[in-house]
Amino acid sequence: MCGIAGEMRFDGGTADAEAVARITAAMHRRGPDGSGVHASGPIALGHRRLKIIDLSERGAQPMVDPELGLTTVFNGCIYNYRELRAELEGHGYRFFSDSDTEVIGKSFHRWGGDCVDHFLGMFAFAVAERDTGVLTLGRDRLGIKPLYLTEGAGRIRFASSLPALLEGGGVDTSIDPIALHHYMTFHSVVPAPRTILTGIRKLPPATVRTIQPDGRSEEHVYWRPRHVRTPEYAGMSAQDWRDATLESLRVAVRRRMVADVPVGVLLSGGLDSSLVVALLAAEGQAGLKTFSVGFHAAAGESGDEFQYSDIVAEHFATDHQQILVDPVRMLPAVDHTIAAMAEPMVSHDCVAFHLLSEEVARSVTVVQSGQGADEVLAGYSWYPPLARVPRVRGVAAYADVFTDRPHSDLASILEPEWLLDHDPSRAFVAEHFAMPGADTTLDAALRIDSTVMLVDDPVKRVDNMTMAWGLEARVPFLDHEFVELAAACPPELKLAHGGKGILKEAARGVVPDAIIDRPKGYFPVPAIRHLEGPFLDRVRDAVTDPVAKARGLVRRDWLDAMLADPNTKRTNLGSNALWQVALLEMWLQERGV
């Protein structure tokens, strides 16, 4: 787990190594254990290192392989790197390190851009070819590891973090009107390749981009779950699906134990993280460290789920740490969390993950986490109604239950100059729903949620907040083979028992029944959900700041009404509407935009 950066010039000039060094230095929290920059002609690559595999200096990056003429930078973990190394050695390759980075480089030499088909893991990488001058960028199937891009003036730059790219200079920081529309309507998600800033884009998940020395480039999408019933699973009974689900998750958890440092678990007390704990315990991981975070109640809403995480910790005899956040830490944590965001993320969970990661990083460097199960296995409340909707009405039905507000509502919120005469968010959903496969409305909803919403909300949240403290988070529910299995699973099995039915059946007898049968919980941060006192003051300061007024995104009459009554108006999915706008403004101010 690290931060990567680079620049490639197309105009005959030499890469700006100093700019790459600034971009790289801005990601020091992603990789506190080392750094490096390598420049050769039109290409310069930078790296910040968090030592997880091959703790020696032989694993340092940028990794130059003079024999093959390749230089590699990489962020993530290839869980099957040992197996790939053995295969490559069989083809005559010689290794000088024990790192998965070197495996990426030699895999690229062997298979070219198709090397990604051989990788089991989470990754964003860049490989520069000395002899051809070609630069290849790749990102993992579920977009667990980020990769941001900025192009112009005869060059392209990339980095693991959007704010880091700003440090390189020369970025168009104007707000992208279509991205703003997505943010305000599509559950605060801005799908790839856009970001909220016009001058920065992101490489989509499951994509390899090949860039020629003259700047010509092409992108190849190498994976997409089909969400259809496939022949290889025909005739499987409910019991067969239960067994297959448990075994696939068991394999996914086992893969993510690969590390040269201890691996812990972020234990919320919900089914997903509890099952990860159970499977790690079954794999014989001794002295397993687990961590839970809680907050003081506010507005009558509980701020912790310790009663459930304690059940799991006691049952599996984990080395458990219960973290109750002192209220005095909450307000500073809001600003620290916003500073850690690569993009604006409205979920109050971000603050929880930021504070939790700070404490966890004192004990371990790698954790497994339960993110992704709800999107992959239909755990959210908006899925059951979609199961009854004909496919031809799927787009409208999905928009009704998932989007923050209809396009027409923006006229009462945004200033006229930011209003669009079309609905790009609805068009995006329609385009996604029209792709081949996903024959039912529910399948189409699960496909867009697991490949778009999941990537740019929960997954990005976990990456940003853990990496702010040099902590690597691994997500077994996003093992791509597990996702493929879940996509093929009959919808009725996923919807059973109020959602995630197949997972609940698989967990029976593996985790305590009290965890399986409990009401669905969330990661509550009451002080953010119910704005009052100093938190409301912080919001008011941001949205009334002269910078915000000069920016002119939001109508003053709407803001005045929201500040007078900050907690009544909610988005369709229950988020605080004022917080959504304020968070964007606070993020822009933090970035100096």
Image (cartoon, rainbow, N blue to C red):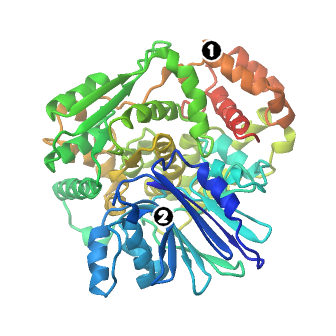
Q: Could you tell whether 471 is left or right of 275 in the image?
A: right
Residue highlighted by disc 1: 534
The residue located at (52%, 21%) in the rendering is 330
The residue lying toward the viewer, choosing from 453 and 254, is 254
Q: Where 171 falls versus 262 (above or below)?
A: below
Residue 577's x, y, as percent?
A: 64, 29
Question: Tag 1: residue type?
Answer: Pro
Q: Circle 1 sits in a helix, a strand or a loop, which is it?
A: helix
Residue 262: image tag = none
Q: Quadrant of residue 241?
A: bottom left
Q: Position of residue 131 (x, y in %)?
A: 58, 87
Identity, as a three-letter code, of the amino acid under mark 2: Gln
Residue at 38% from the left image edge and 27% from the top image edge: 293
Q: Earlier in the sequence, mark 1 or mark 2?
A: 2
Q: Quadrant of the N terminus?
A: bottom left
Q: Residues within 10 Å of mark 1 (few under 14, many from 20)?
A: few
Tell me which corner region of the image, top left, top right, bottom left or bottom right, holds residue 154. Answer: bottom right
Closer to viewer: mark 1 or mark 2: 2
Query: In the rendered image, which residue does mark 2 sit on?
Result: 61
Q: Secondary structure at mark 2?
A: loop
Percent of width and height locating residue 263: 28, 46
* Camera sees residue 528: yes
What residue appears at the point 60 percent right and 35 percent down from the top-left corner? 338
Q: Where is residue 371? Give x, y as percent.
A: 39, 45
Specify whether residue 206 is in view. Answer: no
* Crowd rating for badge 2 (residues with CA inside 10 Å; few <14, some 14–19, many 20+): many
Left or right of 327 in this view: 147: right
| 43 to the left or right of 548 | left
Give yes or no for contact between labels 1 and 2 (Cβ–Cβ under 8 Å): no
What whole-number distance in Å separates the C-alpha atoms at marks 1 and 2? 44 Å
Q: Residue at x 66, y 47 (%)?
A: 182
